Amino acid sequence: MKNLLTIIALLACVVCGAKAQTIKVGDKFFDGYTLYTVQDVRMDKYVYMTDDDDKEVTLEKVSGKPGMYKLTPSRQADDAPFGAQYDWKVQYIRQDGMNFLAVRKPSGDIMWTLVLTPHDKGTCEELQYQMTQDLPSEITSIALLNRAYLSGIPNKHELRLMRNEILARHGYRFKSKDLQEWFGQQHWYRPGKDNNAIKLSLIEETNVQLIKSEEESRNE
């Protein structure tokens, strides 16, 4: 792999704070575009984050669902952030060494990710740039993607292939003829017998949903 050190550095950004249990004041989350810093957590219910321009994002904890929040209108914001809508769910995922916020559509699919990071904005932007220097096939199973990265993929066709390659590398048997032909030409592809037996990692599951959301956004 050409940029193995890049991936290791990026993953260090992803897995930092592995002992964190809740969102707390001072936490920083990077979505590929902007670095958000948690300024206040009130009544253990409302989380207030701001970007470098002091634009505020507010999350409200969902009662009875640990780690689940919803987007709530902020005092300075008219439109919901991240291309989402108010009341869409935001899950704080702390699993398998991962710590990130996942904005979910009403369908449940993840459509935006923000990674917990110890870095300043400049370092995050450098790591983001370095990630673009690797081929998608080299990182989709080991690095959490974001919509900023996916915006650089030129068309829906390549996004579709990227998303399905994650499945293909686990031996997914495709029904679509074009995918059968494409992956059938790949020397590493070995279709299995039972798609239901395939188990994706947390990173892979998230990336599949994120790529799907990017594809759908290009229909809008």
Image (spheres, rainbow, N blue to C red):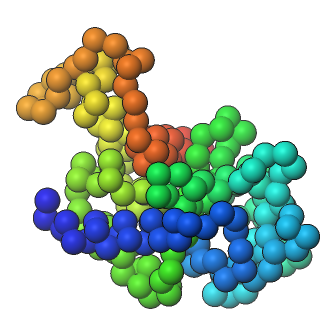
| Viewer can see residue 28 | yes
Residue situated in front as seen by the camera: 83 or 28: 28
Tally of numbered discs: 0
Is 169 located above or below residue 93 in the figure?
Answer: above
In the orientation shown, which residue stands out farthest toward the front? 19
Q: Position of residue 159 (x, y in %)?
A: 37, 44
Q: Position of residue 197 (x, y in %)?
A: 38, 19
Is 71 located above or below residue 122 in the figure?
Answer: above
Name the residue rendered at 75%, 83% in the picture: 39
Name the residue rendered at 84%, 45% in the picture: 64
Quarter of the image for residue 145 reads: bottom left
Is 180 located above or below residue 152 in the figure?
Answer: above
As drawn, is 200 to the left or to the right of 107? left
In the orientation shown, which residue stands out farthest toward the top? 193
Name the residue rendered at 83%, 51% in the picture: 62
As drawn, is 18 to the left or to the right of 44? left
Q: Position of residue 205 (x, y in %)?
A: 46, 40
Name the residue rendered at 61%, 59% in the picture: 101
| Viewer can see residue 178 | no
Residue situated in front as seen by the camera: 59 or 177: 59
Rendered-image quadrant of the C terminus: top right
Rendered-image quadrant of the N terminus: bottom left
Q: Position of residue 15 (x, y in %)?
A: 45, 65
Residue situated in front as seen by the camera: 14 or 213: 14
